[in-house]
Amino acid sequence: MSEPRLRRADRADAAALAEFAARIFAETFGPDNRPEDMAAHLAATFGVRQQTEDILDPDIVTLLMEDDGRLVAYTQVRRHVPPDCVTGEAPVEIGRFYVDRPWHGRGFAQRLMTAALDAVRELGGRTAWLAVWERNPRAIAFYEKCGFRDVGSQIFRLGADVQTDRVMEMALRHPA
């Protein structure tokens, strides 16, 4: 098995990222949500236009991980106004963080998290924060293992459904 390649997304990646992001989100959360809410969210969030805008936005860093040329994970880190419960200095959000299920358990998530935290620093962050669905214990456990702590909650709308995300933050050490 080759070492997965981690790189910054560019405009040419928008269509592949849109397909991958929508598929991963639907596989992860679809079984626990109404199809009409899922369809509305996917259409509003993961189209080629939206991904192109995100990739070109100077306040967003989109990182892709590929294994043998196949997209297997991605993260989007962005300067974004945090909820009030995030109190750390210079907060930057890890807005999306996904590893495709067949690649779980191979160390890809840890490598992607290291890169995401580097991107937080690149955007001027001293605190990384993220929101994670309260009904996703595996992700919460991973973020805790990485050093994040629960600081509160925020609302997340999936179509017409109002859900609760746990908000987690971590103060960053400066790179050695």
Image (cartoon, helix red, strand yellow):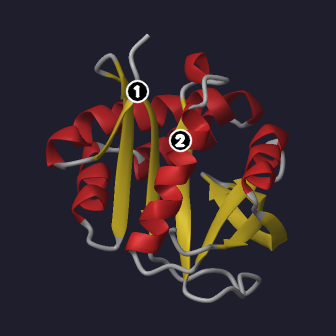
Q: Position of residue 98 (x, y in %)?
A: 55, 39
Q: Quadrant of residue 149?
A: bottom right
Q: Residue furthest left?
A: 12
Read off the residue under disc 1: 4
Cα gap from disc 2 to disc 1, whole angstroms: 10 Å
Q: Residue furthest top?
A: 1
> Residue visible at 68% across and 85% down?
88
Asked if one can make out residue 40 in the rendered structure from this viewpoint, the answer is no
Position of the N terminus by quadrant: top left
Element at label 2: helix
The answer to whether 109 appears left or right of 134 in the picture is: left
> Residue visible at 75% across and 67% down?
167
Read off the residue under disc 2: 111
Element at label 1: loop
* Residue 66 sits above or below residue 152 on the image: above
> Residue visible at 55% across and 69% down?
93
Label 1: few (<14), some or many (≥20) within 10 Å? Answer: some
Q: Position of residue 146 (x, y in %)?
A: 72, 53
Q: Which amino acid lies under the numbered mark 1 shown in the image of this protein?
A: Pro
Q: Position of residue 71 (x, y in %)?
A: 37, 27
Disc 2 or 1, which lies upstream in sequence?
A: 1
Q: Position of residue 136 (x, y in %)?
A: 79, 42
The answer to whether 73 appears left or right of 52 in the picture is: right
> Residue visible at 40% across and 27% down?
4
Asked if one can make out residue 53 in the rendered structure from this viewpoint, the answer is yes
Q: Nearer the viewer, residue 111 or 169?
A: 111
Label 2–label 1 contact, CB within 8 A = yes
Q: Residue furthest front?
A: 176
Q: Which amino acid lies under the numbered mark 2 shown in the image of this protein?
A: Arg
Q: Nearer the viewer, residue 160 or 75?
A: 75
